Amino acid sequence: MQKVLQPKSKLVNIFLAVSIIYFAIPIMFLFVSSTKPPQDFGNTFSLWFGHSFSFFQNLQWLVDSNGGIYVVWLKNTIFYSLTGAIGALLCSAMAGFAIAAYEFKGVRQLQAFILFLVMVPANTLVLPLFIYFANFNLINTPWAVILPSLVNPLGTFIIAYYAKENLPKELIQAARLDRASEIRIFIQLSIPILRPALATVFLLNLVTNWNNFYLPLLMFNDAKLFPLSVGLGTSYGGPGLIMGAFVAMAPILVAFLFLQRFWLKNITAGSGV
């Protein structure tokens, strides 16, 4: 049996190794390029360091250039991403808990509709959102980016599925018999059990909001409201773009490493291992 599975296992390991290299090369390119002085950019091998280590000089130039607008974009990105991720997490957690914990007419149709919304490309909704927000004078305000990010069908689907698999209804019924309120059941009983799914949904929301480009590009015409994705894509080029992209990527990597143990635990639980 082991001899039959061994070639397949080797192929899987080879595929994983190639995938790691494939995804690591762009990160290495950004880091190496961000350490090069301007005169070495484009004149040396892309995946190796230049003649001097100029990371901190490049970082200082990035912070000071264009009146410090990069710092403004970074603050905007953090604000938009965290506000949207936390708000979407709360909405998805409450909706997912309700779908899993309550029996009501049309729950299956609601689940099917949520799954349908997951498959709808987000960019197809940008133009209708623009027209809708224009009627309420929300264009060129932070609300134009924050409000759409509060709705996350995928997060609701993940939490509802995880709650059905890991949150026993008998436990909820026992809490109700003890006269616990629904809010208390949700906060004190369900949230600790759903923590892995909540961490996964939060990370997905954070990455989506952090990389959001098309929506803020259409909603904002004031550069002081731009997130990093729009600011870098429209105002920087060459070494400045490389350095800015590397700094913009760092917080997401830190967040992923911090939440990785919850992410892996959630994947394991969802796979039935």
Image: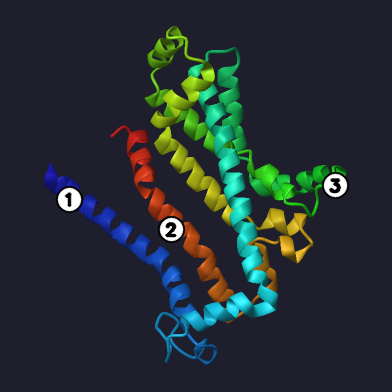
Other-residue count near label 3 (Cα within 10 Å), few / some / many at <14 / 14–19 / ≥20: few
The CA distance from mark 3 to mark 1 is: 62 Å
| N-terminal-most mark, 2 or 3 | 3
| N-terminal-most mark, 3 or 1 | 1
Other-residue count near label 1 (Cα within 10 Å), few / some / many at <14 / 14–19 / ≥20: few
Determine if residue 136 is in view: yes
Q: Which residue is mark 2?
A: 254
Where the C terminus falls, by quadrant?
Answer: top left
Q: Amino acid at mark 3?
A: Asn
Q: Amino acid at mark 1?
A: Gln
Q: Which residue is mark 3?
A: 137
Other-residue count near label 2 (Cα within 10 Å), few / some / many at <14 / 14–19 / ≥20: few
Q: Residue at x 68, y 71 (%)?
A: 69
Q: Amino acid at mark 2?
A: Val
The CA distance from mark 2 to mark 3 is: 36 Å
Determine if residue 228 is in view: no
Q: Nearer the viewer, residue 84 or 7?
A: 84
Q: In terms of secondary structure, where does tag 1 sit?
A: helix
Q: Position of residue 155 (x, y in %)?
A: 53, 37
The CA distance from mark 1 to mark 2 is: 35 Å
Quick check: 249 above or below 106?
A: below
Q: Which residue is mark 1?
A: 6
Quick check: 77 above or below 150?
A: below
Q: Residue at x 39, y 44 (%)?
A: 263
Q: Position of residue 73 (x, y in %)?
A: 65, 64
